[in-house]
Image (cartoon, helix red, strand yellow):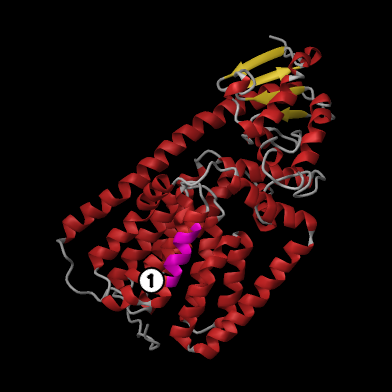
Amino acid sequence: MSRARIPDRNPVHSLPWIILGMLVAIVASGMPLSHDEAFWLAISRKVEAGARLYDEAIDNKPPSVYLGVYLLDHLPGSFKVARGLLVGGLIGWIGLLSARLSRLRGSLHTTAVTFGVVAAVAVALQTEFVLAVELPALTALFGSVWFVLRHRAIPAALMAALAVAFDPRTLLLLPGLVLLTADRSGWPVARRFALWTGALTILGVGIVVVQPDLRYGLIELNLGSRASAGGWRPSAQLAVAFRSLLPLAVAGLLLRPSATSLRNRTIIWMAAGGLAVGFLSVLPFDHYWAYAVVPLVLLGSGADGRTARIRPGMAALVMTISFSPLIVNALTTALEQRDVTADYAEAAMILGAQLQESDQFVSFDIKPYMAADLPDAYALRSPVSGYLVWPTSRSQEYLDELPSLIDDSVAISEDGGLDVDRAAVSKEYRPVWDLFHERLGDFPCIVETGRVILRFRTERCPVP
């Protein structure tokens, strides 16, 4: 990459991206809670009620995630609206930063704006207009690249550390950022960037390793969950990667990136890091591929403004078609999620009407919506799920505690899993299934609401 600044006689202004962010915020505010968002909300409320994170309120994300959700939950108004405003703001920033990065690298104004729009819309669709950890982490990564291209190593390092604080997987992109700094500002500045980023990373990793709860939550639970994810599914992962990255790839081809960009080691290293995150995350989710957006923007912003391969109208049609798989996936997911959350909201109303202040219930299913829908933190470890069966040092401890948790509960929430034959239950879940099944006789009152089954003790059975 050239180190010379390109005079920006036609700068990328903020207003269009503010408008884009507002449009995304409107859509995001109407989206049902995702599984992860409901889980984080339940966890943050459990912690607020006095539970200890990673011990009594158990999940595998960094503390920054729960702090962010806690702050959103305490803003005036609806959590979904607050979430929508945050998502819209982050998407707007991603679009603006993508466009300005393109301009800094010498792209024409039209090319820069094109890549800003494509990047922003692609990320919004990848994350399905909800809050995924990749969204704030990706925004911080773009901020780091922005400061690198502005020859500001220390702010770039702080932004890179912020990305790691939201998602430790972004460590895989740090070598690419070091190379980008070296290409842009020379190795002395790159060493300063690496020193600051490395020091902050080592400090964070050291705290995680030394503190038992952090070590359990951020290392053991993540390794255990990946080990229990059902094995590699390369065909499914490749299909999702193709769907997620197609719009940016098509935009790059239409704008004809230079051969120099295609051979640039910075882009190659960052692309390798982004793709490694997607593959090593095992599960085929679109948002796992979001980190590949950064190198694709850098690659496409190397376009030199030569004549496009096809006419503008045809190019617009091709770009629209390239977004179709992501659009269909986002719509399908939203409709399915709306039905699921509606069923749990109805069940939460019934359950909440029967619970007194000191009562608790226990969940057999792995969906966290009940805990998020209830007005208070009734759920015991909301919900009872993977941490009981993932291979960690605490699995047996929590499994041994489960019978007393069931005995102290006035109701069980489940999604039909307790009605199936034992042979149909996966091997790792059978111990949990057995413990619940042994006590089903204590919860004879059954109320079904859609896909949710509530089992009450006789004295708490809802009156028809």
**Above or below 431: residue 30:** below
Q: Which residues are magenta?
A: 269-277
Residue type indicated by callout 1: Leu
Give the residue displayed 50% in from the left and 33% down from the top: 338
Q: Position of residue 396 (x, y in %)?
A: 77, 39
Residue 22 pos. (x, y %): 46, 54
Magenta-drawn stretch contains 272: yes
At a point 70% along the width and 56% down the height, the residue shown is 63
- Could you tell me which quadrant the N terminus lies in? bottom left
Q: Position of residue 45 (x, y in %)?
A: 73, 43
The answer to whether residue 262 is seen in the rendering is: yes
Q: Identify the residue at horizontal 75%, vertical 25% (top origin).
A: 435
Visible residue check, residue 92: no
Which residue is the site of mark 1? 298
Determine which quarter of the picture holds residue 373: top right
- Asked if residue 110 is positioned above or below residue 397 in the image, the reply reads below
| Side (left or right) of 234 relative to 164 | left
Residue at image point 63% right, 79% down: 196
Classify residue 141 as left or right of residue 445. left
In which image quadrant can residue 345 be found? top right
The quadrant the C terminus occupies is: top right
Q: Residues within 10 Å of mark 1 (few under 14, many from 20)?
A: many
Rendered position, 355 above or below 128: above
Residue at the limit of the structure toward the left, as seen here? 311
